[in-house]
Image (cartoon, grey):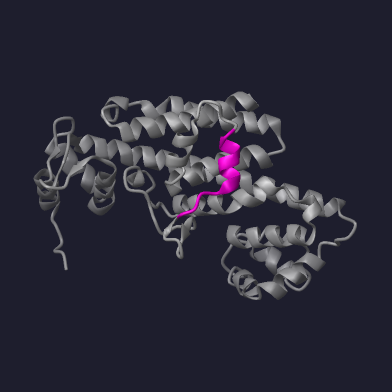
Amino acid sequence: MKSKYSVDEQLKNLEDKNVQFNIMSKEEAREYLQCNTYYFKLKSYEKSFEYNVSKNQYINLEFAYLVELSKLDMYLRELIIRISLHTEHFLKVKLIDDLTKNEKEDGYHVVRELFSKYPFMVDHINQKKYNSACADLIHKYENNWAAWNLIEVLSFGDLIKLYELYYSLYPEQANEVASDLIWPLKFIRNASAHNNCLLNTLRKPYVYTHLYDKKRRTIIVNKRLVSLLSSVPTITKNNRKKKMSNPVIHDFVASLFLLDEICTSQVFKKKIFTEVKEFVDGRLIKNKDFFNFDNVFTTIYDFIRNIVDYLYEKNV
């Protein structure tokens, strides 16, 4: 069992691992740890930097680099949340538009099928009857759900189940790209919504995610995403294969392609991809000198920038 560290002991532990305080002083670092974040979270970003195992020390790592990476992570999570909210909206738009045009479906049948297949969903909805913004809707429609009002109260995970069930019943209306990329969006959306760190995985990616195959004990990349990436002329097959093995990169890229595929408003796509490009070309490289010495950072940045440029030019 590890002992609890005082702030001074936290700084000493970083210093023992060769974390430097040339850009931010120890006094500034102490204040930052007390007022802006906490040690366990900030320290996790060390994993993305080069480490000398034999010496048990980091190489050319400044405390300021950890701070900057944690800030970029925060801005990235905020961007992902906005992307996921908009994508969720357009997934609902497609579902309801298809259902409206479908003479075989009255909107109630698919809900009965949903509750039959996933009876726990009724409990999920009932848990919101007295403590959520959709409580009034639940009281009004709880015994007479149709797809068009049910989607207003479902969690994103349960919405995906409804989406998948509908298109399994009516595959002729399905958008295969959207169906294949929904789960990567869910993973990175949930991680962002729960403030889980993302950019602490650049050198040592997460393993046990939705991409992990237990039998084969390896990451299995989404084939649809690989196919979509092949259309980006500035990305080589080798680079694509290497970068897609990182679940965070994989799911962020999948989220961008899913939004491009499912969004039916060209005006809106122009707005969101302009925002993404401004982030990549602006805030993401505001302190690029902190990372330019490390090939891990520069190659990942170039990979993401090429994809963002491709989608931006396609939609703007």
Front-most of residues 280 and 231? 231
Report the front residue among 92 and 311. Answer: 311
**Residue 303 in magenta?**
no
Q: Is residue 151 visible?
A: no
Residue pictured at 64% horizontal, 65% vertical: 135
Residue 63 location (% of width, % of height): 20, 38
The location of residue 260, given as percent across then percent down, is 63, 37
Q: Is residue 111 left or right of residue 239?
A: right
Q: Is residue 128 above or below residue 243?
A: below
Q: Position of residue 71 (x, y in %)?
A: 34, 39
Q: Residue at x 56, y 39 (%)?
A: 256
Residue at 47%, 52% (x, y): give it: 193
Relative to 220, is 269 on the left or the right? right
Q: Which residues are magenta?
A: 219-230
Residue 45 appears in view:
yes
Residue 220 shown left or right of residue 50 in the figure: right
